[in-house]
Structures are given as structure tokens and as C-alpha cells.
């Protein structure tokens, strides 16, 4: 990478605008396939979140990029370079894992400088880059401390600074916040978002089980299931218009109503029937009149029905839960359990009380049934 000739850390220096390509990657352990014909293109300068349940293959995909896992078939590229057969140290990556992996016997400045010294960078350049990277993560005042003298969030900031110090082509984050408590996690998500604003050309692959982190940070999200790509697209689009049931239920909570398409309603809408109720929702590109499918409505898009709501559902309250800044109502709607999230209610309904629900047609989406 020519560190001796490199300039001080900057958005242009930290990354060369290179993305990551998975091309039909298959990985197996002792005959058990954990990634199957996996293809994904991560654009340069974006944060891509890779999410999925345990055992879905997301961490294996990240480790394949890092060079810690050798695919049985397929190729991995960083920019135009095929890195499939390169050793991890030759790939030009930075990596941060959930347990920080700092050297306990080294001061903070030495932890950050470790990779640069391994690459035999000049002493002056090491000092300059360590200072700049620690400044970027808000840890400039802690250079003389040891990891044991820092909080978990502070240690993770140092781990990120160490990963950035070597001017990585891409940054790999493997569940980097999962060991932190909730308040520190929220703070660190904000810090990571700010970091990427400061380094807009840095490509980031972010593996997490936390959907909120993914939705907050990622430009696009890839959802994995059983070693395959289940859904992929812009974060907002995947959440608001999930392409399948698994995505709807995994990426945030979803109310799913079994419906039948009755006919067109004009302006890109269709009429659907849920039990004895007719509703109007956006049409689906591949579902025809008469199709049985699911109607997805997010809990925060349901509300107490008002006269202007065209879509209305009758339900009975089964449970009310106060969570500080909002209430969660669980309701029975003709045998289908629904959840509604609202601002705090001054007089929450009692269990068993009738509750008329309403929602805007554009706040619902149809999902095709899954087969096989």
C-alpha cells in the first residue's frame, strides 16, 4: 500500500473508492454448506448491513472477505482485484470484531500503531496517523492509557481507530456493538454514522443481528436465510415494502393479514378482502385478481380509526404495554393478532375493550405467498 509515501489520513486517503463483490460464493464446513451460491455487490463508499438469524451465513460471508474462510467455489473481489486467494494481510482491509481484540499489555497509542508498525511505516507517519485516527473517534486524550482503563465503548472506539490507521480499502465490522449495553450502543451507532460522513469513500460491510442498527446506519441491507440471500435493497424500501414474509417479520415487527385480491380500485390501488372487510391498498406487480396473499402493515402505521380513514378494522384489545415514550397495544382482529404502537395514551383501553383501527392505503403492502 506504500505507507511510507502516504499522506495524512483524509477521506480520499482512507479508501480508494473500492467496493466488494461476492460472485457465486459457496462455503462448507465438514460437508455442511453455510453459504450457497452467494452473490452480492457492495458499492464503494456505502455501508452495507448484512443481517439474518444465527446460522444464516452472515459472519461466514464477512470472514470470506477478510480471508479467514476459503470458499469451495466462487470469487471475491475488492474493487477490480480478485482477492480470493490472497492472505488476509494482503487484502488491504480493516476489521473490528465484537470483543475489541485490543492487546492488554499495550497502551492505546501502541494498539492503534500496531498494524502500521507491522507494515514498517515510517515513525513520523505512524505518530501522525495514530493521532489523527484517535481524534476521529474522539479518543485523542487517551493515548497513554491501557485498555483495562477504558470503558467498553471507549475500547471499541480504539479498535475502530486501529482498523482505520492502516488505510483500509474496506472496513469490516462483525457485530461490533453487541457486547455493549443499550445506551452505549445507541451512542456508538451515532459515532459510526458520523465517522462515515467524515470518510464518505470508505466502503463498510457491517454484520449485525440488530435490525435497528442496520436501519439506522446502512445505505442498503442484505438479509440472509439458510446461507442464501433472502432480500436485498435500500434500507427504507426493504422496511416499507418487504418483498417476502421473512423480510417483513425479520426487519422490524409486522402485522400480516391473510387477504384475497378482489379487483382494481384505480390510481395503482386494488381492493382486497380480509374476512368480511374490504380494504384498499397498493397493487402488487405480480399478484393478479383472485390471488391469496398477505397484507403487511407496520405497528406504527396502525392507529385509532378516524372518519377520514378509508381502511377500517374492528378489533378487541388483549394487552396494553407502556414502554415509556410509547404504548404497545396487542389486539385480536377476527382471529389475527395485531400490534399497534402509539404515542403515550392518557387513558389506555382496558383488555377486552373494542378498538376501531385505521390505516392509510399507502402504509400497507401486499406480499406474495411463499412456496416450498
Image: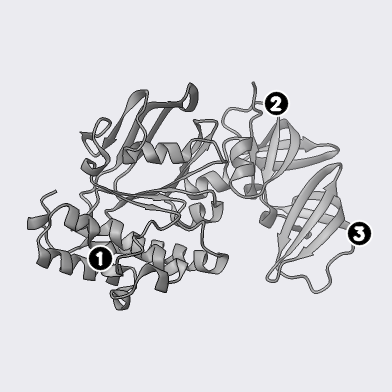
CB atoms of marks 2 and 3 within 8 Å: no
Residue 136 at x, y percent in the picture: 30, 69
Which structural element holds mark 3?
Answer: loop
The disc at residue 208 is: none
Which structural element holds mark 2?
Answer: loop
Which is nearer the eye, 60 or 51?
60
Q: Would you say 179 lies left or right of 349 here?
A: left
- Between marks 3 and 1, how big is the CA–CA gap? 63 Å
Residue with the mark numbered 2: 291
Which is nearer the eye, 112 or 306?
112
- Between marks 2 and 3, how big is the CA–CA gap? 33 Å
Q: Residue at x 85, y 48 (%)?
A: 332
Q: Would you say 92 lies left or right of 5 here?
A: right
N-terminal of the pair, mark 3 or mark 1, is 1
Q: Quick check: can you spot residue 336?
A: yes
**Dot in front, 3 or 1:** 1
Residue with the mark numbered 3: 353
Residue 156 at x, y percent in the picture: 40, 63
Q: Residue furthest front?
A: 105
The disc at residue 110 is: 1
Which is nearer the eye, 236 or 266?
236
Q: Residue at x 46, y 66 (%)?
A: 152
Amino acid at each position: 500500500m506504500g505507507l511510507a509515501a502516504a499522506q495524512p489520513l483524509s477521506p480520499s486517503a482512507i479508501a480508494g473508492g473500492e467496493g466488494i463483490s461476492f460472485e457465486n460464493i459457496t462455503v462448507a464446513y465438514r460437508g455442511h454448506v453455510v453459504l450457497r451460491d452467494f452473490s452480492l455487490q457492495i458499492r464503494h463508499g456505502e455501508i452495507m448491513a448484512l443481517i439474518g438469524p444465527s446460522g444464516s451465513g452472515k459472519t461466514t460471508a464477512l470472514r470470506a472477505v477478510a480471508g479467514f474462510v476459503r470458499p469451495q467455489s466462487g470469487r471475491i473481489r475488492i474493487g477490480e482485484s480478485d482477492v480470493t486467494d490472497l492472505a488476509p494481510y494482503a487484502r488491504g482491509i480493516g476489521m473490528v470484531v465484537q470483543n475489541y481484540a485490543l492487546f492488554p499489555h499495550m497502551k492505546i497509542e501502541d494498539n492503534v500503531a500496531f498494524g502500521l508498525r507491522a507494515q514498517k511505516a515510517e515513525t513520523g507517519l505512524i505518530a501522525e496517523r495514530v493521532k489523527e485516527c484517535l481524534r476521529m473517534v474522539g479518543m485523542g486524550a487517551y493515548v497513554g492509557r491501557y485498555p483495562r482503563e477504558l470503558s467498553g465503548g471507549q475500547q471499541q472506539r480504539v479498535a475502530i481507530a486501529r482498523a482505520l490507521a492502516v488505510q483500509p480499502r474496506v472496513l469490516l465490522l462483525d457485530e461490533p456493538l453487541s457486547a455493549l449495553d443499550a445506551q452505549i450502543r445507541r451512542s456508538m451507532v451515532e459515532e459510526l454514522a458520523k465517522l462515515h460522513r467524515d470518510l464518505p469513500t470508505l466502503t463498510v460491510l457491517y454484520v449485525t443481528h440488530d435490525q435497528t442498527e442496520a436501519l439506522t446506519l446502512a445505505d442498503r441491507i442484505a438479509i440472509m436465510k439458510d446461507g442464501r440471500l433472502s432480500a436485498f435493497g435500500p434500507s427504507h424500501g426493504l422496511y416499507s415494502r418487504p418483498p417476502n414474509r421473512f423480510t417483513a417479520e425479520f426487519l422490524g415487527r409486522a402485522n400480516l393479514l391473510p387477504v384475497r385480491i378482489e379487483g382494481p380500485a384505480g390510481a395503482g390501488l386494488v381492493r382486497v378482502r380480509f374476512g368480511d372487510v374490504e380494504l384498499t391498498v397498493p397493487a402488487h406487480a405480480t399478484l393478479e385478481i383472485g390471488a391469496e396473499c398477505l397484507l403487511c402493515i407496520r405497528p406504527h402505521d396502525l392507529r385509532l380509526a378516524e372518519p377520514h380513514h378509508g381502511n377500517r378494522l374492528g378489533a378487541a384489545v388483549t394487552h396494553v404495554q407502556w414502554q415509556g415514550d410509547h404504548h404497545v397495544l396487542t389486539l385480536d382482529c377476527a382471529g389475527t393478532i395485531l400490534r399497534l404502537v402509539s404515542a403515550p395514551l392518557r387513558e389506555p383501553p382496558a383488555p377486552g375493550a373494542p378498538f376501531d383501527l385505521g390505516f392509510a392505503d399507502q402504509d400497507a403492502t401486499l406480499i406474495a405467498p411463499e412456496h416450498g
